Image (cartoon, rainbow, N blue to C red):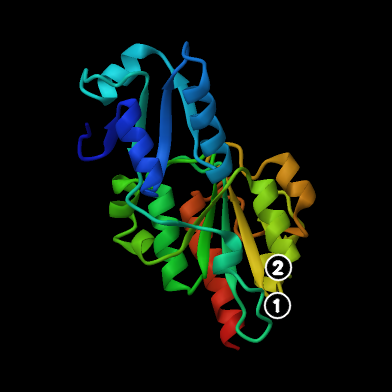
Amino acid sequence: MHTSKYIYGRNPVTEAIKEGLEIEKVFFQREITGEFEKYIRNYCKQKNIPLSKVPDVKLDNLSRKGNHQGVVIQISPLKYFEIEDVFTGDLENIEIAIVLDGITDVRNIGAIARSALAFKAKGLIMSAKGSGAFNEDAIKASSGALLQLPICREKNSMIAIEKLQQLGFEVLASDLKAKDLIEDYLIEGPVAIVLGSEDKGVSREVLKVSDRSIKIDQSTAIDSLNVSVAAGIILSELYKKIKI
């Protein structure tokens, strides 16, 4: 059985997987073990799908107290792509990639997507864990931009960055403590921008593996900009440099 957004029950969930439906998240009853749990866990790992072990009452709420049999899946309104299928590392037609490192607010996700589309970024990359859902609210906040941009989902930002670097991307992490300004950055090839969470910024581990850190030239009147505003400024700067 299913509602407009959720499918629940072991057989319906298994059929949804076999049919290749895009799954946003899986909710599994925390006490359940066995072959079915192993099957779901391995599938989520293979497809980079967030898996949450939750109490039975959570599943009751999601399925409207239906016969969920310990599992509920949330269907994604978007199609997810592999990084290698979206980005090529082309030196002639310079690509911009955006990596979202732990951004959870769907309004920020939507606003970033709008800027990405406006300034011709090639696609967005999100982490399976610790990121906000690319759901109907995010699509609405993006004014439909999320439906026009390729979205990639990786296990974490570290793997995403490694794949981009292997494709020839220079990875820039947005960081308030950076010495280099985005306004002074010279584009010589494909570039990826890493944007951090609303409260913590880009994680320390991600900063270490990025090629360099950059910041926006701004006054000291305020500590930081909203992440979606910062994304718009950074992408605008890159877009102007690409057009030169």
Residue 182 visible in this rendered orientation of the protein: yes
Q: Please, what is the three-letter code of the amino acid marked with disc 1? A: Gly
Please give the label number shown on residue 169.
2
Q: Which residue is mark 1?
A: 189
Compared across the picture, whether 25 is left or right of 152 comes to: left
Residue occupying the point 52% across, 17% down: 34
The vertical placement of 90 against 12, above or below, is below
Q: Secondary structure at mark 2?
A: loop
Quarter where residue 48 is shown: top right
**Residue at the (74%, 48%) spot, across then down:** 207
SS assignment at label 1: loop
In depth, the one of 12 and 203 nearer the eye is 12
Which residue is rendered at x = 51% and y = 15% of the image?
33
In this orientation, which residue lies closer to the viewer: 28 or 17?
Answer: 17
Give neighbour class at mark 1: few <14, some 14-19, many 20+ (Cα, 10 Å).
some
Spatial distance from mark 1 to mark 2, Cα to Cα?
7 Å
Asked if disc 1 and disc 2 are in contact, CB closer than 8 Å, the reply is: yes
